[in-house]
Amino acid sequence: MTKLSRYAVLFSFALLLAACAPGTAAGPSAWIDAPLSGSQFVVGQDVEIVLHAGEAGGISAVALSLGDELLATLPNQGSAAFVTLRHTWRPDAAGEYLLSAVAQNRSGEWGQPALARIIILGEEDAPEEPPVAALAEDCTDSAELLSQALPDGRVFAPGQEFTQEWVLRNSGNCTWSTGYKLVFFSGTRANINNPQISLGQNVQPGGSASFSQGLAAPAQPGNYTWLWQLQDEQNDRVDAGFLGTGRIQIQFSVQAPDEEPSGPVGVATTPAPLADTQAPVIYTLHWSPTQPTEDDYLSFSVTAGDNVGVTRIEIYFVRQGQSGGLIHTCQNSNVCTFNYSQPLNAGTYIYSARAYDAAGNQVSSFNQSIQVAAVIR
């Protein structure tokens, strides 16, 4: 993540956030509940970010940024006007960071930013007894989703019971202990009775394990997305599954009682497409190098998701104050990358993206400011 060492930079970025958000102060609002501004953490320690957002017409997503870099976009797949969202961030460098949260409403409008200053201490400045997360084993922990028993898009009757099973491969070089578990993360009007599935065995690197969960469809008809994430014995997330977000998902629909069943009642085997009523969500916007000069060539990467499927991602990059800026388009993919091969003059540029689905729903990302520094020769 980008380290910000001067408050002038922090303040200027806060002004940029406000300038990029259309509408008035009466638009969607976001609040950062945790961490409180001025909180201190240690490099390698997980920072649990808790926030809420609201607007009468409903919240579509909340964009989290650290300084001038988008950290994550948290989607709200329900219709509630007031939502609480969570995200875990693990800092890898000491310094002072400006955390900002900006809410987007169902019309695609962004509100004003909520800000919090976070101080990350180096290991040499840590307390005598550092947090457990800072004592983690010196290895790389990751997982790969090999299969899931029930594919996304199934249709269930209200209250119908079914069983989902995921098979994960240990794709890192850490041994999974019996303390690893698959933990329920979030869902659309979820009613999960068992939010945690224990591994119960040791799994060596390269090995695999299955997690089985008995579930029941909600009583209310509609489209549902439930998310789980793999955690180690210290409750730290292990990257796995959908778009590298560390989450395992199941998407399904519940039929109205007066509708003719599309398959045998009590048998969760009838595939059916989900109704594409939700706009896509842009999860990440990355660029490299993060602090470019006139001698650098920029690379861009965008990830997006949709309850049915992303049909197009557009990448925009333009000098501040100018219009247009479409530089690349990717079709039928959740990931879009592009290497910008043109030389750049020193100045401020705006980087953004748009994602589309087959039903014509679309979403625009929050604008990211990239400062290209001059090279003194």
Image: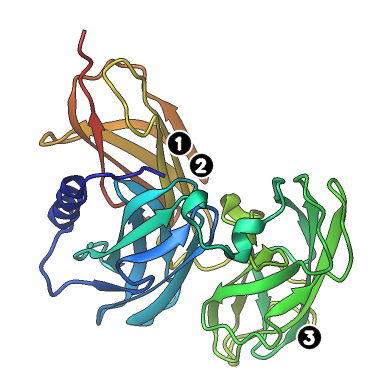
Cα gap from disc 3 to disc 1, whole angstroms: 40 Å
Image position of 16 (left or right of 250): left
Q: Which residue is mark 1?
A: 330
| Secondary structure at numbered mark 1 | strand
Q: Which mark is residue 266?
A: 3
Q: Amino acid at mark 2?
A: Val
Q: Which residue is mark 2?
A: 335
Q: Residue 32 lies in what quarter of the image? A: bottom left
Q: Amino acid at mark 3?
A: Gly
| Secondary structure at numbered mark 2 | strand
Image position of 44 (left or right of 38): right
Q: Position of residue 169 (x, y in %)?
A: 80, 52
Q: Amino acid at mark 1?
A: Cys
Q: Tell which tag, 2 or 3, sits nearer the viewer.
A: 2
Question: Crowding near pointer 3: few (<14 within 10 Å), some, many (20+)?
Answer: few
Vertical placement of residue 194 versus 269, above or below: below
Q: Which mark is residue 369?
A: none
Vertical placement of residue 80 versus 310, above or below: below
Question: Crowding near pointer 2: few (<14 within 10 Å), some, many (20+)?
Answer: some
Q: Quadrant of the C terminus?
A: top left
Image position of 76 (left or right of 99): right
